[in-house]
Amino acid sequence: MQYVSIERCESYDEEKVYKALEQTINNLGGWRKFIKPGNVVALKPNLLMYKKPEEAATTHPAIIKAVITQVQKAGGLVVIAESPGGPYNLTMLKYVYKMTGIEKVACETGAILNYDLRVDTINQSNAKYLKKVEIIKPLADADVIINLPKLKTHAAMVYTGAIKNMFGAIAGTSKTDLHMRMPDYNKFADCLIDIFTGTKPTLNIMDAIIGMEGYGPTSGDPKHIGLLLASENGFSLDVTASKLIRLPLNYVPVFVQAKERGLIDEEIIIHGEQLENIAIKDFKIPEHSADGHPRVFRRRFMKSFQYLLKPRPEIQNGSCVRCGDCVRNCPPKVIRMEQGKKPVINYKDCIRCFCCQELCSHNAIKIHRNLLSKALVNKKITGLK
């Protein structure tokens, strides 16, 4: 049996966030349950790229500041550690910390911003695929890891929360290598689970004050939710968040694979706000199922149409500034750009990881689905529920 704490917090006002966070953690037993004086505590927020806080793509600095202050009060020594999308180097880290508002928080609180670019190997015999995995050193060295995800839906993986946030424990372009090795969404989900179980966060606190709906994790639409969620168990936290936005668990690859591995316990006790009082009816979910295909593809007679009907990234002429980020961040290297022209995607070899869309700082890449594909996931046409 697992426990999840949910408390209301309508805005990022620092005083309101502080009080809501304090109550959220008190519901789970209080900070002293998780932090001992002198512990090195690594905070792992979602800072996947250089987005401003108001864009709702990254963990808000008001939450990170409240966590730091309360951890310090409990006697913890705080380091903030993340490996954003793209290269893992000092230039990228400094820019991401500054743009996301984390640099300012560190200055105000005295928390350490990680600039150690070393990695360390963790071994786990019970992993499905990643028996050995290299993670960034501050996470490997920490006494306690606090995972700070953002509640968002995701163009490829349908949902991203506590489990997927720990993908940022993998340094830089090694994340690209994993995308290439595991282009199948379910196998990639197992890799995410392996990383999460290998890093073993002590506590998971979710920023759901303003989440992101639609084709996230960076180009979706901000959505006011007004909540903070926390749990010792990342799977229980994500299951609860998915129920909050009325996302069926069998649509999400991570949940499908975690359930097969016996990692999901749906007997969850909620402390604080109850789901029936706060569930969101109109949260926009990406229109493809847990295997990365429209839901109707579960019917065998449609298998031959899978490639034709898969959603695909499309570059928007009016928004593209030809910066080349999509070319540099494409795992299978199927995007090319000629001087003075917009990038071109070779869809034949595209693995639909949507890294190009995720890491486009200009929101110039959208997820496109053709008319037949849209019809096949239309509930009124297919009768699917």
Image: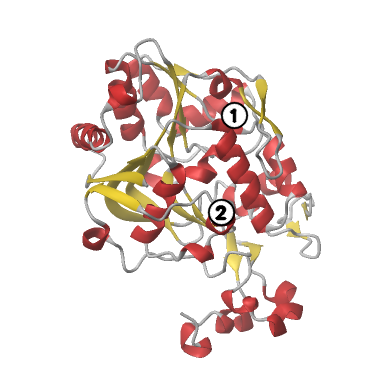
Residue 4, relative to residue 89: is it above or below? Answer: below
Q: Residues within 10 Å of mark 1 (few under 14, many from 20)?
A: some
Let me know if residue 331 appears in the view: no
The type of residue carrying mark 1 is Met
Residue, x 63% and y 65% (percent of image)? 291
**Which numbered tag is attached to residue 92?**
1
Q: Is residue 102 left or right of residue 49?
A: left
Residue, x 37% and y 17% (percent of image)? 107
Residue, x 60% and y 20% (percent of image)? 137
Q: From the viewer's perspective, is the residue at label 1 or at label 2 nearer?
A: 2
Q: Nearer the viewer, residue 138 or 33?
A: 33
Q: Is residue 174 left or right of residue 276?
A: right
Q: CA distance from mark 1 to mark 2?
A: 28 Å
Q: Position of residue 25 (x, y in %)?
A: 27, 34
Q: Is residue 281 left or right of residue 16?
A: right
Farthest-out residue, top:
38
Judged from the image, the secondary structure of the residue bearing numbered disc 2 is helix
Q: Position of residue 11 (x, y in %)?
A: 23, 44
Q: Position of residue 364 (x, y in %)?
A: 58, 56
Q: Residue 234 occupies which quadrant of the picture?
A: top left
Q: Is residue 48 left or right of residue 119?
A: left
Residue topped by disc 2: 254
Q: Residues within 10 Å of mark 2 (few under 14, many from 20)?
A: many
Residue, x 44% and y 41% (percent of image)? 58
